[in-house]
Image (cartoon, rainbow, N blue to C red):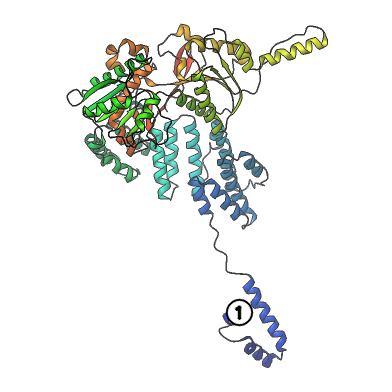
Amino acid sequence: MLADRYNGGHSAQQIAGQFNKSMNFPIKIILFLFISFSLASCASGPTPTKLNPDEAELLFARGEYQKADALFLDLARQLRPYKRTLLLLRATAAEARMNNLAKAKRTLQGLKINYAKADQRLLLRLTQAHLALMQRQVDKVLKLLAVPPPAGSNHFYLADYYDLRADAFNLSGNRIETARELIKRERYLGDAALIHANQQDIWQALAMLTEQALMQLRTDPPPNVLSGWMDLVRIAKTYQLRPAMLRQAVQRWQHTYPQHPADQQIIQGLLNRQQQDVSLPKQIALLLPFSSKFGKAAEAIRDGFLGAYYARHMKNRQSIHIYDVSNSDVTTVYQQALAQGADFVVGPLDKAAIARIASQNPLPVPTLALNYSQGNNIPVNLYQFGLSPEDEARQVAERTWFDGYVNAVTLVPTGPWGERVVQAFTQRWREIGGQIVNQETYNSANKDFSRPIRRLLNIDQSRRRYRSLSGLLNRKLKYTSRRRQDIDFVFIAAYPRQARQIRPQLKFYHAASVPVYATSHVFTGNLNPARDRDMDGLIFGDMPWVLTDNNHPRSLRSKIEPQISRVGHSFQRLYALGIDAYNIIAVLNTLKKYPYERFDGETGSLRLDLKQQIHRQLTWVKFVKGRPVRLDQGI
């Protein structure tokens, strides 16, 4: 059967007979040679499939690094040395992106690079840049990639080059350059899904900027692609709540940028928005604990809510009914509000009260809770929004990680608040790869925090070593206390009175050069350079409402400043929460339908996650001469 497949149907005996007649060869020898040839042919198996490194590159571009790594290594085993080196460099980059840095570095050190080959030099730079990026070494990434790849380089390598630069600029907070590099990347993407994802990344980068910044920073006239994206994002922000005007503005944009590469899905998403996407309930019930220990907080939220209501001129189309839920069962008050005609509920403020309302699944009307519930079974109609100190602590962790730090120490007050904050920070810090080298607590009622600071910095241990050595030698020694040297930064949770003491004492104990990060609680919200000068150098995240350079076009600050109540001035952040709690109602459907959209609020740049929790993007500032000065200028 094997012989028949290769000889047109003639048997081995027939062929051997012909050879024997013509050449007088022994039949046995001919049969042996023929069968050996046939078996050798069968043993080689079917022709191997064509090797295609592009499949691995596509997996890499999609972020499927583990699969890409396995395929690159498999291909490398089958190809000649020159190609093998290229594939091993790509496998090393995939290992770096999986955060397996030790393995990636070992692999890279074992490779023999032929520097005479341009593609090997390029891939070496890309691999080193991936390693640097995963270690948040932004300057190193940009230095490695300062020179563009040679013309005609592999399009996957070119796309990776611009993606790396975009990631580096994004880590540094430079939104414009992030978008610019992503636009360049798109030229080398052949996959429709990758192009769509890339354009959403462009949108998200630019959506972090205010309308004013998008207008001011646009320098190139049409048909410049980046300017087109900036104009489109600005239009979406400006007319977010006015679909008819949004449609007209997008049509004008299309006329101005007829050849713009923006995905039709994005354009149609803007053109198809309807007025029903804008939620304008007729009667809003505001449920707050006015008669409880949180009464002042409730008043500040109420005043901000009403301030936004009157500023938006909704008096003739909307009514607000206010309910005190301090001494009543919250579910009873909730049902009362519904019976009286509420088609949207805002509140309550207490987590336990939110959990009780959430247990009524499904909720009959959309409800915006002003805190975050710990439960997982969240009703479809429940949205959650608040000023969570835990959320701020997690953002501090992310910010310090992006700033390139690894080793942290924490200093927080004793008690539940400090425990919640440090737990949130520590959990997020370890999730992203950071290390906690020491943690201390302090009594917030004290005025002197030197003892916990000495323990935090190991100053006491340094002193004990001095005393031990001095006693051993039985004589006095020249001595300067030393702090531990394995600290990249200090995270503190503190209010202004404590922070004004902690920062100088850290300097006194030889930690003047160590960066200090905190939540917004260190700042009163009112400028007081004389008192806050002691906090110079301290970095924290806060909301636009309380910062002096708050100038985004939709800000109500200048408009309603004369009407801000006394409690609104005392509890500024809660007042701003009240403003945003009212304003975001109208845009909730849009944020839910288009996850890449954001809302520029008084409390920050707001987005809605899949659990329908609203998250704020903080503005980062540093105390300079007693004043908070922005770190990220949004460019």
Mark 1 is on which residue type? Leu
Q: Residue furthest right?
A: 473
The residue labelled by disc 1 is 2
Residue 146 % position (x, y): 53, 36
Which residue is at a point 38% across and 17% down the rendered structure image?
A: 546
Residues 313 and 190: in front is 313
User: What percent of the width, then of the height, locates residue 224?
Assistant: 35, 38
Q: Residues within 10 Å of mark 1 (few under 14, many from 20)?
A: few
Residue farthest left in this picture: 316
Residue 288 picture location, percent across and down: 32, 20
Of 432 and 222, nearer the camera is 432
Quarter of the image with the C terminus in it:
top left
One can see residue 8 in this view: yes
Q: Nearer the viewer, residue 349 or 23?
A: 349
Say left or right for 305 vs 432: left
Q: Which residue lies at the image location 63% right of the left edge and 14% below the top edge?
A: 454
